Amino acid sequence: MTDLQNKIGYQFKNPALLNEALTHSSYANEHKSQHIKYNERLEFLGDSVLSIVVSDYIYKNCPELPEGELTKLRASLVCEKSLYEFAKKIDLGKYLILSKGERHNGGADRPSILSDAFEALIAAIYIDGGFAPASKHILNFVIPAIKNSKKKKINDYKTTLQEIIQKNPGEKLEYVLVKESGPDHNKHFIVEVHLNSNVIGKGGGRSKKEAEQQAAREALELMGY
C-alpha cells in the first residue's frame, strides 16, 4: 500500500480506509465468515465528491461554455471510460483485493471494477483527510483531461468541415458574423457558415472563434457527420 500512496501523493492516517477502498465485493463474499468491508459504500460517496469537484472546477475555469456544454464536459470526465483511464495511470488494478476467481477472470483490468475502485479511493481520501486532498487527487487527473479535450475541440469542427469541403474542388467555405451583442466583458457572437453563399450552419459563443466552431459543428451534424 505504501507504493500506491506514493503514486497518488497522499499518506493515509487510517490505512484501513485505503484497504476498504481497494477491496472488491468478490473478496468479501469469498471470506464471508470474516465480515470484511468492501468498497461499494465508498464508491457511492466518491461518486458525489467527484461530481462536485469536477463541477466546481469547470464552472470556474471554462467560462466560455454554456450550461449544456458544461454538462456534457462533466459527463465525459466522470464516466466509466474516463475513470478507467485514470485508474490505469496509477496501476490501480495491481492493488485491488479480489477473489481468486475474479482475479483469474481478469477483474483487475475490468473497466467497471477499476472505475468503481477509483471512486472508492476518492471517498477514502475524503474521509481520511477532508475535501482539499480529495479535490487535489481528482484534479491531478481531470485537469490534463480537460486540456486534451479543449485541444481536440479547437481543431475539431472547423478543421473537419474544411477537410470535407476540400474534397470537392471549387467549393467555397466562408464564416460570416451576423450578430454581436452584450457589453465588452460579456460579448456574444453569432456566426453563420456559408457554402457557396448557402447557409449550412449557425452557432453562437462568447468569442468569434467559439461561434465559428459551433457553426461548423451544426453544419457537420446536418451533413450527417
Image (cartoon, helix red, strand yellow):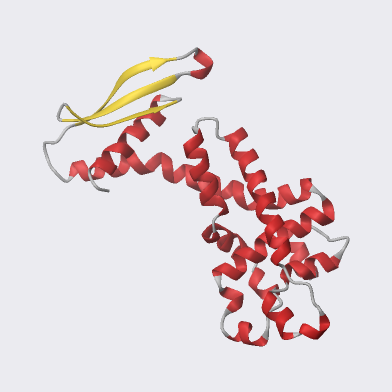
Which of 70 and 192 lies nearest the eye of the viewer? 70
Q: Where 212 sits versus 157, above or below?
A: above
Residue 38 position, x and y percent, is 74, 71
Number of on-image labels: 0
**Image location (x, y in percent) of residue 65:** 50, 33
Which picture quadrant has residue 61? Answer: top right
Give the residue displayed 43% in from the left and 21% down from the top.
Answer: 188
Q: Residue at x 31, y 20 (%)?
A: 177
Q: Where residue 90 sits in the image (x, y, percent)? A: 65, 64
Q: What is the quadrant of residue 103 in the picture?
A: bottom right
Left or right, residue 42 beside residue 212:
right
Q: Which residue is drawn at 61% across and 76% down?
A: 108
Dividing the image into 4 quarters, which one contains the N terminus? Answer: bottom right
When the figure is inspected, residue 137 is found, relative to residue 69, above or below; the finding is: below
Which sits in the foreground, 167 or 135? Answer: 135
For the residue pair 86 and 125, the one nearer the viewer reads as: 125
Q: In which quarter of the image is residue 104?
A: bottom right
Q: Which of 77 and 47 is in front in this view?
A: 47
Residue 167 place in picture, x, y as percent: 17, 46
Is 13 left or right of 204, judged from the image as shown? right
Residue visible at 71% across and 77% down in the picture = 97
Question: Seen in the image, is 129 located left or right of residue 122?
Answer: right
Residue at the farthest top position: 183
Q: Is 60 rendered above or below residue 207?
A: below
108 vs 159, left or right, is right
In the rendered image, the residue lying farthest to the left is 170
